[in-house]
C-alpha cells in the first residue's frame, strides 16, 4: 500500500503538477493506488485497528489530522482572498486605484471583451509592463466580461499571426465583430514634467481604447481653413498636428472645412495677432452674448517667466473639474479678455477660466510691458474671464446649443501642448492638452471622454536633525539587539526554574 502511495506521489508530480491537467497516466495510477488501498484496508483491518490503538500512533494520527485542518483553513482563506479580494490603496495620490471615469466606462461592457497581450506576465515591479498587468487585473475584477490572455511569441507563433501582432508588448482590445484597438508598449509611458522620469499612462490608454470600442459611431469635428487659420497637417511649433492626433486617438473624425467668407474662430487670440484683429468676429460673437476688447491680460501673481504668460484659475465647471482636482495647470500666452452679456438668444453663461484678483485686462494700442500699469478708466480689474461657455435653448432641439470662447489659441499649438516638439515646456503647460480635449468632449456632451490624468509620484524629502539621526541609529543598532537578548535570557531563566 505504501508503495502505491509513493508511486501516486511521483505520478502527481510528473503527470499532473507539470502539465497542469490530469493526464491519462495519472488517472490510471490514481485508480490502481485507490484499489490497492481499499483491498489492503479490507484484508488487514484487524492489524490496522491494533496499530491505531498504540499510543504513539494515536498521537501521530491526531498530529497529522491537526496539520490537515490547518492546511485546509489556509487553502480556504486563499480561495476566499482570490474570489473576494480586499485591497487598500495607501499611496497618497491613489496610484493603484482606477478613476471614476474608468469605472463608469467598464460598467457599460455587457459582452465579452478580449484583451490579448503579446508577452509573458511581468515580474518586475519597476517596469511599465508590471503596472499594465496590475491594471488589467483590476479591470477584470471590476467587470467579469473582460478576458485577458498573455501570448508568448516564441511558444505560440501561430497566435501571434492570428491577431496580426508585430511588436512584443503589443496589446489588442477586441469587442464585438472585428472591432479592434491596438496599444503598443511605447504608448504606456510619457516623460514626467516634474521628475523627468517615465510616467505610466496606461489607464488613460486602456480606458480610451475600451471607450472607442463601445462607441457606436464617431463624432466629426471640423476645423475651418482658407482664412489664415492654423494648419492641421503642420508638424511645426505653430501647427495643430498633435491636436489632430489626440482627437483621432479618441475616435473623433477630424475634417477640414473651407467656407467662403467664413470668419469663425473658437480660440480668439489677442488683438496683437493681426489675423484675429481683422477677422470681424466680434460682431458675430456679440450676437450670441460674447464681448471682446482689444486688450491683453497681465497677471504677475499667476504667470510663467513674464506676466503675460498666464496660468489661469479654474472655476467649478465640468471642463476644468479634473484639472482642478488633479492640481494640473495650463498656460495661455498673451491672452485677451472674454466677457458675457445680454443677447437676443438668451444664453446662459459660465466662466471656465479666469485670472487671479490681482490680474487685469490692459487696453492699449501697443504692447509694452515695461510701462504697463493698471488704469481704472480703461482697464478691467481681475478676476478677468479668459474662457466662457454659453448655452442656448433652441426651439425644436432636445439638447441646448453650446458655444465656448477662449481668449487665446496658443495653448492648443504643438509647441505648447507636447514637450517632444523640441521646445522646453514648463510644468504650467501640462494641462494644455487636457483643457482642449475636455472642451471638445463638453461641446459634444461626451463627458466620458474627459482625459484621465496619470498619477505622478510626488518626491518628498525627510530632513532629520543630528539628534534624531543618532536616536534612530542607537535604537536600530543597540536598542533592538539588546531587547531581544534580554527577552532570550528571561525565557531561558524561567525555563530553568
Image: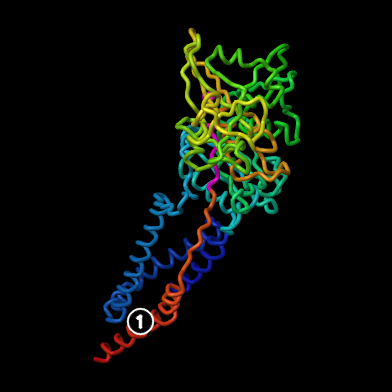
What number of labels is visible? 1
For mark 1, give the secondary structure.
helix
Residue at the spot of label 1: 483
Say if 407 sits above or below 57 in the image.
Answer: above
Q: Quadrant of residue 61?
A: bottom left
Task: Identify which residue, 285 or 30, lies in the foreground.
Answer: 285
- Taking the image as drawn, is residue 447 in sight? no
The percent coordinates of residue 277 (x first, y second) are 68, 20
Q: Is residue 187 left or right of residue 344?
A: right
Region rendered in magenta: 443-455
Which secondary structure dominates the residues rendered in magenta?
A: loop
Quadrant of the frame with the C terminus: bottom left
Q: Is residue 307 magenta?
A: no
Task: Identify which residue, 273 or 141, lies in the foreground.
Answer: 273
Q: Is residue 71 left or right of residue 128?
A: left
The percent coordinates of residue 484 (x first, y second) are 36, 81
Residue, x 37% and y 85% (percent of image)?
A: 485
Amino acid at each position: 500500500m505504501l508503495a502505491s502511495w509513493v508511486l501516486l506521489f511521483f505520478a502527481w508530480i510528473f503527470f499532473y503538477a507539470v502539465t497542469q491537467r490530469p493526464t491519462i497516466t495519472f488517472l490510471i495510477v490514481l485508480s490502481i493506488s485507490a484499489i490497492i488501498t481499499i483491498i489492503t484496508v479490507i484484508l488487514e483491518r484487524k492489524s490496522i485497528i491494533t496499530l491505531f490503538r498504540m499510543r504513539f500512533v494515536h498521537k501521530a494520527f491526531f498530529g497529522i489530522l491537526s496539520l490537515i485542518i490547518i492546511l485546509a483553513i489556509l487553502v480556504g482563506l486563499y480561495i476566499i482572498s482570490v474570489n473576494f479580494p480586499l485591497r487598500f490603496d495607501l499611496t497618497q495620490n491613489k496610484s493603484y486605484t482606477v478613476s471614476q471615469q474608468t469605472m463608469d466606462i467598464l460598467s457599460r461592457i455587457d459582452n465579452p471583451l478580449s484583451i490579448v497581450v503579446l508577452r509573458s506576465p511581468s515580474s518586475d515591479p519597476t517596469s511599465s509592463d508590471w503596472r499594465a498587468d496590475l491594471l488589467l487585473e483590476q479591470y477584470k475584477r471590476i467587470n467579469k466580461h473582460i478576458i485577458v490572455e498573455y501570448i508568448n511569441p516564441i511558444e505560440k507563433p501561430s497566435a501571434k499571426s492570428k491577431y496580426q501582432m508585430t511588436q512584443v508588448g503589443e496589446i489588442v482590445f477586441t469587442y464585438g465583430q472585428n472591432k479592434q484597438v491596438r496599444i503598443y508598449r511605447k504608448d504606456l509611458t510619457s516623460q514626467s514634467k516634474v521628475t523627468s522620469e517615465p510616467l505610466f499612462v496606461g489607464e488613460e490608454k486602456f480606458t480610451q481604447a475600451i471607450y472607442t470600442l463601445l462607441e457606436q459611431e464617431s463624432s466629426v469635428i471640423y476645423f475651418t481653413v482658407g482664412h489664415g487659420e492654423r494648419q492641421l497637417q503642420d508638424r511645426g511649433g505653430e501647427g495643430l498636428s498633435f491636436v489632430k492626433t489626440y482627437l483621432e486617438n479618441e475616435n473623433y473624425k477630424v475634417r477640414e472645412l473651407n467656407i467662403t467668407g467664413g470668419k469663425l474662430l473658437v480660440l480668439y487670440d489677442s488683438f496683437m495677432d493681426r489675423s484675429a484683429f481683422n477677422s470681424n468676429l466680434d460682431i458675430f460673437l456679440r450676437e450670441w452674448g460674447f464681448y471682446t476688447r482689444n486688450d491683453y491680460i497681465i497677471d504677475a501673481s499667476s504667470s510663467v517667466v513674464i506676466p503675460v504668460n498666464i496660468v489661469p484659475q479654474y472655476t467649478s465647471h465640468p471642463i476644468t473639474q479634473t484639472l482642478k482636482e488633479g492640481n494640473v495647470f495650463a498656460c495661455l500666452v498673451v491672452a485677451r479678455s472674454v466677457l458675457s452679456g445680454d443677447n437676443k438668444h438668451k444664453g446662459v453663461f459660465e466662466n471656465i477660466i479666469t485670472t487671479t484678483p490681482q490680474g487685469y485686462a490692459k487696453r492699449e494700442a501697443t504692447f509694452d510691458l515695461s510701462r504697463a500699469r493698471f488704469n481704472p478708466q480703461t482697464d478691467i480689474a481681475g478676476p478677468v474671464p479668459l474662457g466662457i461657455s454659453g448655452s442656448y435653448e433652441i426651439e425644436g432641439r432636445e439638447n441646448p446649443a453650446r458655444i465656448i470662447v477662449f481668449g487665446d489659441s496658443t495653448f492648443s499649438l504643438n509647441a505648447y501642448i507636447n514637450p517632444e516638439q523640441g521646445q522646453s515646456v514648463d510644468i504650467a503647460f501640462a494641462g494644455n492638452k487636457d483643457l482642449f480635449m475636455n472642451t471638445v468632449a463638453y461641446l459634444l456632451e461626451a463627458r466620458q471622454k474627459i482625459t484621465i490624468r496619470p498619477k505622478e509620484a510626488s518626491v518628498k524629502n525627510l530632513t532629520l536633525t543630528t539628534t534624531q539621526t543618532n536616536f534612530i541609529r542607537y535604537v536600530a543598532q543597540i536598542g533592538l539587539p539588546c531587547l531581544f537578548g534580554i527577552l532570550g535570557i528571561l525565557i531561558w531563566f524561567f525555563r530553568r526554574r
